[in-house]
Amino acid sequence: MFDFDRLDKEFLLIRDTPYISPARLADMFSVTPRTIRSDIASINKTLEKHGGYIRLKRRSGYYLTVDDAVALERFQNNISKQADDKTPFGLDSSDDRIRSVIELLLVNDGPVRQSDIATATYVSDSTVQGYIRQIKDILARYGLKCIVERDCGVFVFGSESDKRSCFLGELLPHGSRFDSGLPFRLFSDLNLNAILRLTVETLDHLEVRASDYGLRNLLDCIFLMLSRAASGHEVEESRKGIPEDVAGAVNTLASNLESATGITLSSAERSWLYRQLVAHTNIGSNPSQLKGIAPSVSRFLETIYRDYGYDFRSDGQLMKAITAHIESVFKSREAGNNIPNPLLWTIKKSFPLAFEIALGSARQVFSEKPYILDENDIGYIALHVGAAIERNRPDTVSKVKAVVVCDAGRAPSAMLVARINSLFADRIEVVSSISTQSFALLSPSELASINLVFSTTRLHECPCPLLIVDFRVQDDDVKLISHWLATNAEPISRALGDVFDEKLFLIIDKDLSKEAVVSRMCDSISATGTVSSEFHELVCLRERASNTALGKRIAIPHPIRLCATKTKIAVAVLRYPIVWGQNDGNKVQLVFLLSMEPKIGTKMERLYDLLVRIANDEKTQREMIAANSFQDFLSALDQLQA
């Protein structure tokens, strides 16, 4: 095997592809071409000892040459075996590497040189500089400051409490506490199984209850507390002490942890432990204080039905989930907890309709203390609303049944299946994922119900339509799959009727402010006579409530409540990018101003799904930004297919 996961995957791709260009490899792994050249040099340094070598053919790409087939086969078998056992939390994506850099900065009290960061993450110095810019925005969400000094390195400043919130929000959700990945390195001196067993036994003795999810989160908090306290990073004293009625239980758990690990837990650490118990167990529950939540949740579901047309009023599962979440929020606030939602940006980008329904309805119902919800809380509620929408969605579309064939190992195969499900869940059903050998053994009857085969390598005598893709399903593969699916599909521009209108399409070639752009777009929709005179004001109210950026280049401003008599979308292409949010740093060049009728249900879902697809398709974005006319815009839109 090679030094780290990315090199293994690069080798397997080059081995299984006649030629693959440096640019495509760089795009697939979110690194620079310079980093790819460095990777290939590292691969060859190992590979030449095992009978192979990777060469570059001009205008074609990298390819594998074989000098000793037996030695190379032995080496490849070793890669395949060990690749299956690797942690999914590696350095394969830019997100993984950014999390790795955050961990490196948080565990070091002093500065970390950028050259050391580049070495630790296997990227170039220029790539590190780009990561640091993103990390500054991430740390700011937790009240932390990231400062770069040329002669010293990169520092992180902030309280220990805020640093722990960052650990919990950015690092631990991406890898189980028992994985051999990045979070585990933080806990390498702890006997995790012994601490888990002790915690569970103590909670049981104290009759403290937690859900499986709550227990996992509590254990992560305990591991983090012990690790940080042992390394001298003690949390600050809390202004709120431990209430007398639960102090005995908190101190019993803390004392048992001290005895088992030899790590002293101060009064400040015990207060921090109390706050985590409140957040993740039934400690601190006060039925009399929480009695107003259930009626408020009922009004919340009634508001969703009245304004958006989704009838969840008898959805017991949704009511229970939202009630439990709000109870947890109330308890945590009383204990002094204030942890940002690390998934907020992902939720807003991936589930904008669910977030909009949750935000609009929550602002009407949860507007008085103690039940005022901020967008962090609304983000979690949006996930429950989104799940309810999916549960109640009528399954009227006949999906293509597909088989995935991949011999590169379980991890690449799982990635390929996940990508197909993520991008084409509404059109494709992956019925199985198998090896080339297993596929060859399928009988005609087993293949009779299969409509399509995805494979990472060429297959001999494939009786079904075959699409050869790489396991990451990149832009070219998405286009290939979309083209196959869309052979008889209706173009989006025609399917959506007059939602998009040439009179509502603007190319703005002046350097305007965000407010000026929104004002011009509101004027264009107001001219259609489909909105009231307060439309612009309602759009500004929504913008102040929460950032409407949907991706790095896209924003979807809209009114705080549905108020149109006919659904319209105004589009603005900005020749001069605009920074849309205060802290996200994203420079928007495509603005979709939404004006929708109440209770349009399925049509609203379809429009939001379309916007999410545009936000996730950089090629379509580039073509739309380059559009010089409304027809150019429609042509780019239709390439996505309905």
Image (tube, helix red, strand yellow):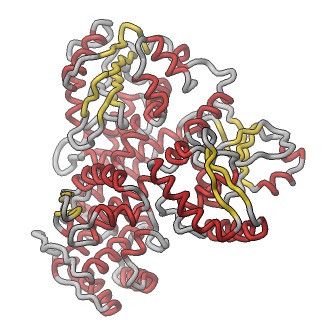
Specify whether 443 is left or right of 616.
Answer: right
Which picture quadrant has residue 198?
bottom left
Q: Where is residue 43 in the image (x, y as percent from the top left)?
A: 57, 62
Say whether residue 570 is left or right of residue 462: left
Front residue of 450 and 465: 465
Q: Is residue 367 something one can see in this rendering? A: yes
On-image quarter of the C terminus:
top right
Residue 537 in the image: x percent, y percent? 19, 22
As drawn, 59 above or below 416: above
At a point 59% along the width and 38% down the height, the residue shown is 424
Residue sitting at x 60%, y 32%: 479
Q: Position of residue 135 (x, y in %)?
A: 29, 54
> Left or right: 110 with respect to 316?
left
Q: Quadrant of the N terminus?
A: bottom right
Q: How far across and down, in percent of the image, does residue 117 sit?
A: 34, 63
Asked whether the viewer can see residue 323, the reply is no
**Residue extending furthest left?**
239
Q: Quick one: 328 or 408, which is closer to the camera?
A: 408
Between 516 and 595, which is closer to the camera in this rendering? Answer: 516
Q: Nearer the viewer, residue 480 or 599?
A: 480
Q: Residue at x 45, y 17 (%)?
A: 633
